[in-house]
Image (tube, helix red, strand yellow):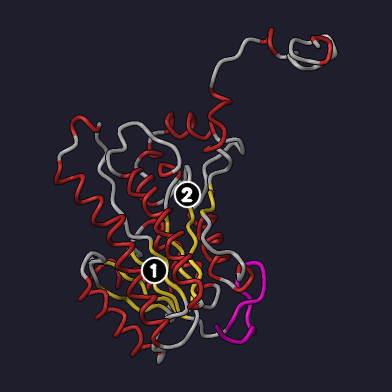
């Protein structure tokens, strides 16, 4: 994937590397684009909204190219990749970040079929089509590459009234493993990043409420919300040569909150000594 000449993130990377980020017209995708350009990548800022794509590309500098495509449309994706190839002079990009996604919060009993299908189409089918378009080009060019999909802690644990969102993100995680299995022999790595409580993108309206912000921050073991830049740094690590032997994994970027559910459950202090000594119930003293 190139010669190690420039610094990206925490270690050596390569010069003139090219990357497409879907859903990069706002939120987390835009933050990943900014960090990637700062790290020396040439970035395709892909969004279905042409104004958003152009705005973000202009804001991050001359190494960004606005691309317009609906990720659920194969023809539009191919046209966007053609344009990026023409602008970069590379038949295939070095990396693809499948970030485009939508959410429709609703209790399952009230969720309309159309809303279910819309979330499924963008989050799961759009990820598949974007990644496949990238992989076909990389394999056709006889090159190697890396894919990072953006999943969610809601794809690991259920959340209230999440509708189809969590199910689609869990699906993307398994799809990413499938990509890693099938495309690894072709030199393509695929990994997922699962953001937790991040003050960016679709979550920003939630944290506009100071009390909700305080309560949620207090539930995170590290004591605060995460930032878009912290998610971006993990994405860039997984794209880099430093992660050359990382393939098929889902990495939680959540400050430990996903694994801390047990801490929210009540437990009487009277059981704190269980198992602590020879005479504790179940210990050696009960033999």
Residue at 38% across / 52% down in the picture?
Answer: 201
Q: Is residue 90 above or below residue 28?
A: below
From the top left corner, tell me how far across and down residue 124 is, in percent: 31, 56
**x and y percent of residue 9 in the render?**
61, 68
Q: Quadrant of the C terminus?
A: top right
The local secondary structure at tag 2 comes to: strand
Magenta-drawn stretch contains 210: no
Q: Which is nearer the eye, 233 or 148?
A: 148
CB atoms at circles 2 and 1 under 8 Å apart? no
The first of marks 2 and 1 along the sequence is 1
Residue 97 drawn above or below residue 252: below
Classify residue 142 by image quadrant. Answer: bottom left
Identify the residue at horizontal 29%, vertical 85% (top origin): 82
Picture quadrant where residue 59 is located: bottom left
Mark carried by residue 21: 1
Which residue is at 57% across, 43% downward? 255
Q: Residue at point 36% right, 51% down? A: 171
* Other residues around mark 2 within 10 Å, as few (<14) / some (14–19) / many (≥20): many
* Residue 195 badge: 2
Relative placement, left or right, of 90 versus 269 is left
The rendered magenta stretch, by its main secondary structure, is classed as strand
For the N terminus, the image quarter is bottom right
Q: What segment carries the magenta color?
A: 1-14
Q: Secondary structure at mark 1?
A: strand
Q: Position of residue 241 (x, y in %)?
A: 61, 74
Which of the 4 quarters of the picture holds residue 282? top right
* Residue projecting furthest to the front: 287
Mark 1 surroundings within 10 Å by alpha-carbon count, few (fewer than 14), some (14 through 19), many (20 or more): many
Separation of marks 2 and 1 at Cα, in angstroms:
16 Å
Front in this rendered view, residue 280 or 71:
280
């Amino acid at each position: 994937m190139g010669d190690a000449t420039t610094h990206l993130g925490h270690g050596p990377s390569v010069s003139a590397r090219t990357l497409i980020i879907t859903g990069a017209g706002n939120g987390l995708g835009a933050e990943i684009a900014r960090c990637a350009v700062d790290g020396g990548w040439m970035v395709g800022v892909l969004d279905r909204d042409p104004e958003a794509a152009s705005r973000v590309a202009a804001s991050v500098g001359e190494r960004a190219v606005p691309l317009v495509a609906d990720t659920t449309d194969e023809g539009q994706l191919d046209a966007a990749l053609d344009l990026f190839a023409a602008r970069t002079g590379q038949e295939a990009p070095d990396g693809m970040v499948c970030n485009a996604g939508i959410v429709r919060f609703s209790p399952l009993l009230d969720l309309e079929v159309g809303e279910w299908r819309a979330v499924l189409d963008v989050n799961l089918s759009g990820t598949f089509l974007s990644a496949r378009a990238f992989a076909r080009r990389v394999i056709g060019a006889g090159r190697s590459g890396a894919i990072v999909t953006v999943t969610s802690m809601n794809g690991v644990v259920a959340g209230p009234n999440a509708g189809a969102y969590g199910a689609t993100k869990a699906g993307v995680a398994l799809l990413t493993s499938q990509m890693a299995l099938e495309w690894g022999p072709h030199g393509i790595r695929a990994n997922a990043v699962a953001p937790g409580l991040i003050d960016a993108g679709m979550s920003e309206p939630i944290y506009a409420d100071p009390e909700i912000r305080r309560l949620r921050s207090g539930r995170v073991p590290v004591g605060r919300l995460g930032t878009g830049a912290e998610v971006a740094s993990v994405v860039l690590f997984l794209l880099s040569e430093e992660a050359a032997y990382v393939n098929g994994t889902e990495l939680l970027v959540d400050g430990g909150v996903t694994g801390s559910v047990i801490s929210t459950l009540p437990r009487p202090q009277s059981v704190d000594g269980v198992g602590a000594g020879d005479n504790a119930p179940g210990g050696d003293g009960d033999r």
